[in-house]
Image: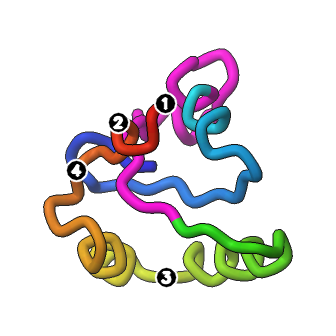
């Protein structure tokens, strides 16, 4: 998740992407970090078969520099557009 200027990112793990996005969009159910930085746009996601792999990847990405994250996002979403409508939220 990102803000509209793509200056801040939220990285997390979920077993239900649609529900998690809904939580982000409803301020009562998201984190203080999400509210503070207005991280409401889905710009990138990865799917995993095993939750342990997803958690390992989350930990890895959280250690990355901002520019590395931007390059990763742009590798599949060049314009860094909001992808929520693509997954039928």
Mark 4 or 2: the one toward you: 2
Q: Secondary structure at mark 2?
A: helix
Mark 2 or 3: the one toward you: 2
Residue 39 colored in magenta in the image: yes
3D distance between C-alphas at marks 1 and 2: 6 Å
| Residue contact between numbered discs 4 and 2, judged by CB atoms under 8 Å | no
Mark 3 or 1: the one toward you: 1
* Residue 70 position (above or below residue 86): below
Q: Secondary structure at mark 3?
A: loop
Q: In this orientation, which residue lies closer to the viewer: 37 or 46?
A: 46
Q: Which residue is mark 2?
A: 85
| Residue contact between numbered discs 1 and 2, judged by CB atoms under 8 Å | yes
Give the numbered dot on residue 89.
1
3D distance between C-alphas at marks 2 and 3: 27 Å
Residue found at x 63% / y 28%: 23
3D distance between C-alphas at marks 3 and 1: 28 Å
Q: Residues within 10 Å of mark 4 (few under 14, many from 20)?
A: some
Q: Position of residue 45 (x, y in %)?
A: 50, 62
Mark 4 or 3: the one toward you: 4
Q: Secondary structure at mark 4?
A: loop
Q: Which residue is mark 4?
A: 81
Q: Residues within 10 Å of mark 1 (few under 14, many from 20)?
A: few
Q: Which residues are magenta?
A: 23-45
Residue found at x 45% / y 49%: 1
Q: Which residue is mark 3?
A: 64
């Amino acid at each position: 998740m990102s803000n509209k200027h793509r200056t801040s990112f939220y990285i997390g793990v979920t077993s239900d992407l649609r529900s998690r996005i809904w939580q982000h969009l409803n301020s009562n159910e998201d984190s203080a970090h999400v509210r503070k930085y207005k991280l409401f746009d889905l710009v990138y996601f990865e799917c995993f078969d095993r939750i342990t792999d997803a958690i390992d990847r989350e930990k890895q990405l959280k250690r990355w520099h901002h520019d590395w994250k931007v390059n990763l996002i742009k590798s599949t979403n060049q314009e860094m557009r909001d992808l929520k409508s693509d997954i039928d939220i």
